[in-house]
């Protein structure tokens, strides 16, 4: 019985961190095409030019920083990929 108790304790010790890690992972939803297009439109509005390959890392990073700053200072929740229609 003593070896069974040791095995059970060992199983619990191994299982608890695995369960905690599984719960800590955020659930990622797949990104829709509309969300990708909306993000690209925001980046273009912030100055990103996909055809400017000579300044590729700098121009996308600068545009992403501008979009992030706009989202941080925006009032209300993020509305990525959503639209509102008036009826």
Image (tube, rainbow, N blue to C red):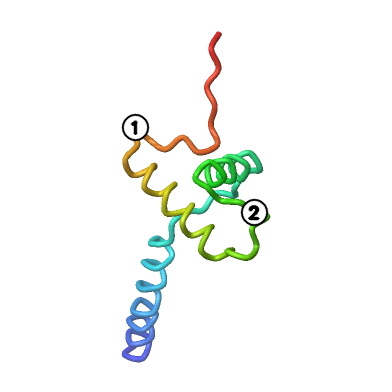
Task: Find residue 27 and report its horizontal and vertical position in percent.
Answer: 48, 53
- Tag 2's secondary structure? loop
61 in relation to 10, above or below? above
Task: Find residue 55 and report its horizontal and vertical position in percent.
Answer: 58, 64
Q: Which residue is mark 2?
A: 50
Q: Which residue is mark 1?
A: 76
From the viewer's side, name the closer residue of 45 and 34. 45
53 in relation to 85, above or below? below
Closer to viewer: mark 1 or mark 2: 2
Residue 65, picture quadrant:
bottom left
* Number of marks present in the image shown: 2
Residue 23, picture quadrant:
bottom left
6 in relation to 53, above or below? below
Q: Residues within 10 Å of mark 2 (few under 14, many from 20)?
A: few
> Residue 35: which numbered mark, if any?
none
Give yes or no for contact between labels 1 and 2 (Cβ–Cβ under 8 Å). no
């Amino acid at each position: 019985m003593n070896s069974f108790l040791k095995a059970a304790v060992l199983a619990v010790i191994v299982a608890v961190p695995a369960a905690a890690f599984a719960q800590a992972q955020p659930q990622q939803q797949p990104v829709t095409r509309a969300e990708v297009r909306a993000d690209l439109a925001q980046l273009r509005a912030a100055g990103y030019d996909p055809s400017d390959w000579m300044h590729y890392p700098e121009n996308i990073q600068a545009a992403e920083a501008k979009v992030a700053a706009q989202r941080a200072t925006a009032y209300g929740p993020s509305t990525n990929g959503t639209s509102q229609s008036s009826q």
